[in-house]
Amino acid sequence: NEANEAQQAVEKDRRYLWHNILPYSKNHKPMIGVKGSGSWVTDMEGNRYLDAMSGMWCVNAGYGRLELAQAAYEQLAELSYFPLTQSHLPAIRLAEKLNEWLEGEYVIFFSNSGSEANEAAFKISRQYQQQIGQHHRYKFISRYRGYHGSSLGALSATGQAQRKYKYEPLGSGFLHVRPPDGYRRPAGLSLTAFNEQCAQAIEDTIIWEGAETVAAVIMEPVITGGGIIVPEPVYVEMVRDICTRHGVLLIIDEVICGFGRSGRKFGHQNFGIKPDMVTMAKGLTSGYLPLSATAVRKDIYDAFKDEDLYGHFRHVNTFGGNPAACALALRNLEIMEQEQLVERSRVLGERLMAGLAGLAEHPLVGDIRGFGFMAGIELVEDKASKQPAPLAVMTEMISRCKKAGLIIGKNGDTVAGYNNVLTLAPPLSSTDEDLEFILTTLTKVMQEYT
Ligand code: PLP
């Protein structure tokens, strides 16, 4: 019977599967998902949950879309694999479509994951700088609390101690600066002045390191996994200007912010800046298949057009740009356009923030932050000292939500001493009723927690 099968699967899971990131717990009972539809997932025991984290911030168009399965199926039947040392139509079409979404002239390099997209961006940055005669530019600057991936280069750029400290020393030449975490700014400083100071810290680092040694800055438009840290527009504008003035490339990591999550097609479009490179993954296929991309400004690509054997990009990725993944991604973007999911994200995000506003009075809530259709609720032990709430409170809150049928996330950094931001990033296709369910469930759970 069903309960028996579920029990056996749990036992086999414990024996054979090594899970992502979770600390080991002898009695951990994994949720074994078996079906998804819209914003809802069902586990092996038949329980239904609203997935307010879209898996890992990726199921932007929602679960269970047969059209996406069909697009992949048809492409697999027609041409299941072809390398991008050659070419194929789904990759060409998708690259063209991404250019349209990016509103600029970019050349696209495909990989499979966000980490790989960032690795490609780092390698392109270093080689590009060499090829324009800037031989000493090898360093990268990123922000503390930002996450850029699990591979050694992307992890080096990551600014979260908990993800890194067991694997150090990591790549050399990766420097970090303070993020514009307005909630924790020094007392007496205005939010705008603080944002300006944080941007200035990037310029100071470039100057102190010697501008001729810095290859690129990498940042998310809004720090997502690090706790929804939203900059003021002046910060992003200043960083763009600083990079331009110092010959430093600006890589914008849109792995989470891209594909409508921010209320625009890409997060940086909220700030009116043009990045030199854009990396993307997750929402590109709404998580249905692995695919990522590094979009490179056309004139940077032009520096690799050297026809002798020295100028080309020496990077190969067997599975990057798989034809079925590209065909599926293209269909995913068409669905997002047809159903106006980017606009929907903006509307839902505004309603989400309005609905969460009532929680501000809760004794544990220090700050509520949102951007597009995502939100972070920073929990503190004490509103005046802003002492982060302990991990146990976070875990309990998440577990109570789960019991009530709602999956939410948590982000922060256990090693650096804060792990205290509850996160929400539901599918952009969520219905009005879905949003209502999220708000009523979360509010009830939080109000009952004392
Ligand atoms: N960049 C950001 C901002 C991310 O949030 C992530 C993953 O969560 C990555 C990069 C790495 O993506 P992946 O896990 O697909 O390698």
Image: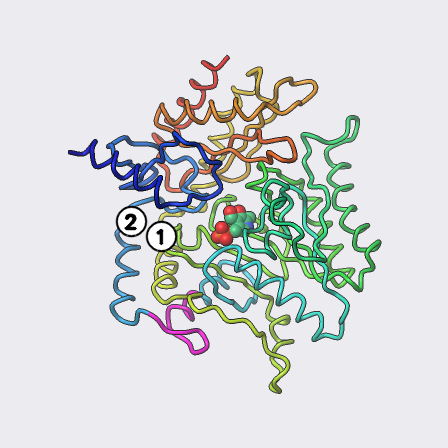
Tell me residue 21's x, y (percent): 49, 42
Left or right? Give the position of 81 relative to 152.
Answer: left
Residue 90 lies in the magenta stretch: yes
Q: Quadrant of residue 321?
A: bottom left
Q: SS for tag 1?
A: loop
Mark whose residue sits in front, 2 or 1: 1
Tell me residue 197's x, y (percent): 78, 41
Q: Residue at x 66, y 71 (%)?
A: 127
Location of residue 58 with respect to 388 vertically, above or below? below
Which disc, if any, is residue 65?
A: 2
The amino acid beneath tag 2 is Arg
Label 2 and label 1: CA atoms lie apart by: 9 Å
Q: Which residue is drawn at 54% across and 32% down?
A: 376
Tell me residue 277's x, y (percent): 60, 61
Viewer-side residue, 250 vs 147: 147
Q: SS for tag 2?
A: loop
Please say if the residues under marks 2 and 1 sit with CB atoms less than 8 Å apart. yes
Left or right? Give the position of 298 relative to 190.
Answer: left
Location of residue 298 with respect to 290 vertically, above or below? below
Viewer-side residue, 344 vs 326: 326
Question: Which residues are the magenta region?
Answer: 81-94
Q: Mark 1 points at which residue?
A: 288
Disc 1 crowd rating (10 Å Cα; few below 14, some 14-19, many 20+) is many
